[in-house]
Image (cartoon, rainbow, N blue to C red):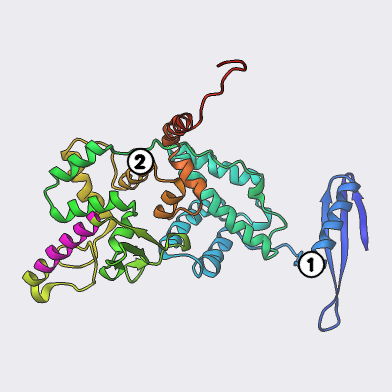
Amino acid sequence: MGITKLGQRRYRIEIDRGRTAGGKRERYYETVTGTRKQAQARDRELRRLLDTGIDIEPSRLTVAEWLDQWLANYARPAVSARTLASYGGTAAIFAASLGPVRLRDLRPEHIQATMASYLAGGRSNRTGRRHFVVFKSALRRAVRLGLLYRNPADAVEPPRPERKEMRTADLETITRVLEECRQDDLRRLIYFAVQTGLRAGELLGLTWSDIDWDHGQIRIRRSRNSFEASGFAEPKARSRRSVAVSKGTLDVLREQRAAQNQQRLALGGRWAHHDLVFPRREGSPEDVNNLAKRWGALRDRLGLTGLRFHDLRHTSATLALEAGVHPKVVQERLGHTNIGITLDTYSHVLPNMQREAAEALDALLPRPRERGAS
């Protein structure tokens, strides 16, 4: 046992794996092409893997087979239906080009070529990077299970995400939108979106029981998600939060409730009871995509090309920061994981805030006098 030279730059590694339950002795053989030093390094690595309980026998599992297992056994129990669907799209991309490759034979150059081909099809770097991160995570799980010695994606340069131009509306534009919106329920929804900075799914998942009228708070406990069987999903931990609202915003909510009660009485038995603050006209849950279409029709009529409904969230954060609200408070209202995301996303506001800080300090501190000045 050990290392045997087979020929020019070829060595055979032999490792005793002990005896089976039936008493038969098992040996593992592997051929290494290279120098004796490289063969010795490989021999040490194999023995280390054995000592930690990892199976060193080459698996015939392919990339496509592993992705199927990963989706079913590891991703499905851990993520939402929407995220699982996204992961399935990632698996399809890599299975199409790397599916037949044995998992143990996967190399960084395979992954790099797949990413290059994907991006050459006109996809954005941001989307490509997202798929790469998911695939790398699937391979990381394979390493933890001993199906791979190391993660080949670690040696791959991921696509650099291009910085998306931030679109926001100023106060004049928002005022115009609210004045010219012909649908009262949509007008109230737009007002509420700018006041709170909630995501579209969070707005459409809000129920009347989530509103604390006495303390001026709304609780974000679920989000509209058409991928889930119920039509709703619990938000991530940081997104479960309470957001303070003003008296004026509560007044708008009271208007919404009064109008909704009138509609419910008019429809009678045809009203769908879901307790939603912003449902469809018959009370059933509104869809995020349909809301985007309604907003798009209003936006196009007003000539606000390119302004998405989601940009109302950016508008809310920008207006708050410009008004002097502390970034930490803005982070908590938006439900960002950490303040770094908030500061990076809204860095366009920071120069003005720095200028205001400099002027404020200048007003507070007396200028130093020269020595000897009277």
| Residue found at the very far front of the displayed protein | 374
Quadrant in which residue 203 is drawn: bottom left
Look at the image and tell me whether residue 223 can be seen.
no
Residue 261 location, x and y as percent?
Answer: 12, 68
Q: Classify residue 345 as left or right of residue 8.
A: left
Q: Which of the 4 quarters of the picture holds residue 175?
A: top left
Q: Is residue 362 left or right of residue 308?
A: right
- Above or below: residue 129 compared with residue 273: above
Give the farthest residue toward the bottom.
Answer: 22
The residues colored magenta run 248-262
Circle 2 packing at 10 Å, graded few (<14), some (14-19), many (20+), is few
Q: In the rendered image of this protein, does residue 360 appear above or below residue 31? A: above
Q: Percent position (x, y) of residue 217?
A: 33, 62
Q: Nearer the viewer, residue 1 or 221?
A: 221
**Mark drawn on residue 133:** none
In the structure shown, which secondary structural element does the residue marked by tag 2 occupy?
loop
The label nearer to you, 1 versus 2, is 2
Residue beneath label 1, please? 52
Tell whether position 251 is magenta.
Answer: yes
Whichever of labels 1 and 2 marks the residue nearer the N terminus, that label is 1
Q: Position of residue 30 (x, y in %)?
A: 82, 58
Q: Is residue 229 magenta?
A: no
How far apart marks 1 and 2 lie (CA) works out to 58 Å
Q: Residue visible at 19% across and 42% down?
A: 177
What residue is disc 2 on? 323
In the rendered structure, the answer to whether residue 74 lies left or right of residue 324 reads right
In contact (CB < 8 Å): disc 1 and disc 2: no
